[in-house]
Amino acid sequence: MSLLNVTCLIVLSCVVATVTLAGDDADLFREDFEQAELGSIPKELLVLSGGFAVKTDVRGKFLELPGSPVEGFGLLFGPTETQGVTVSARIWATPRGRLNPAFGVGLNGVSGYRLQVAPGKRVLEICIGEAPKTEVPFVWKGGEWTCLRLQVRKSGKGTWIVEGKAWAQSEREPERWMIILELTEEPPAGRASVWGSPYAGTPIRFDDLMVRKIANGK
């Protein structure tokens, strides 16, 4: 093959790769805490309340919320958006006796939408602010990382769709959204979030925080 043909193939490959990447979801924010200082809070995170701090174990670093006090806590991260984005995170927690924690991820700021695992009720729910709006049955595996994904997008009917899913890290991600909420009012602008309520008095850990732009807003 001539040098000219090789050059043309390389250029063509780059063009194809560029087109493929342009059509993929784009990362807007990513934090796995591996470069963060122990005991610190990365400057990209805005803590609303709670004693969050970077900790570590044999598997790596994570952000930990202590098991006391027993209240609801949260923090914000990523850019301010209204729609066409998805947030994901891994969250680890444990029960204590009959007491269970609650935890989740959110979009559109403090008063926006939250996808919350509520083991005490055995449900996965979507909340607006702190108020639950819809729920589906969900069996939580305590002591194992739980993956959560939430997105907000505009539909073709002039409404907005909030969709969520959650699954144990040891399992495959569900292909379909597990819970859906349809809105008639435009979502507020706001940042992504994670939330934790250590009702069991045990720590809650957060890792792999990510915000991505949905390709074509769908």
Image (tube, grey):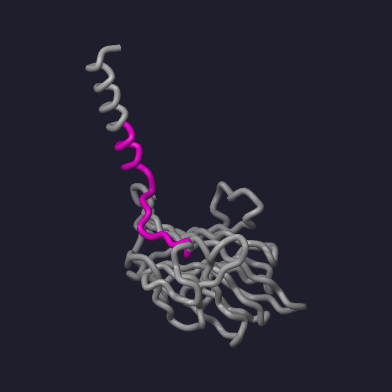
Q: Is residue 76 visible?
A: yes
Q: Residue furthest bottom?
A: 69
Which of the image's four quarters has the N terminus? top left
> Is residue 162 in sight in this rendering?
no
* Nearest to the observer: residue 50 or residue 84: 50
Q: Residue at x 36, y 60 (%)?
A: 83
- Return the x and y of residue 37 as percentages of the image width and height: 46, 71
In the image, residue 9 sits, relative to residue 39, either above or below, namely above
Horizontal relation, residue 97 to residue 38: left or right: right
Q: Nearer the viewer, residue 59 or 91?
A: 59
Q: Residue at x 70, y 63 (%)?
A: 141
Along the line of sight, the residue nearer the viewer: 38 or 29: 38
For this view, does 111 lie left or right of residue 131? left
Q: Nearer the viewer, residue 99 or 188?
A: 99
Point 49% across, 60% down: residue: 208
Asked if residue 19 lies in the magenta stretch, the reply is yes
Q: Which residues are magenta?
A: 16-33
Task: Count the marks.
Answer: 0
Q: Residue furthest top?
A: 1
Residue 171 vertical position relative to residue 199 in the rendered view, above or below? above
Residue 86 point in image, percent of width and height: 43, 58
Q: Position of residue 107 (x, y in %)?
A: 42, 67
Residue 78 x %, y %? 37, 66
The residue sitting at the right extreme is 97
- Is 59 colored magenta in this rendering? no
| Picture layout, residue 39 above or below residue 86 | below
Residue 72, by quadrant, is bottom right
Please state if 205 lies on the left or on the right of 213 as rendered.
right
Q: Residue at x 61, y 57 (%)?
A: 167
Which of the 4 quarters of the picture holds residue 102? bottom right
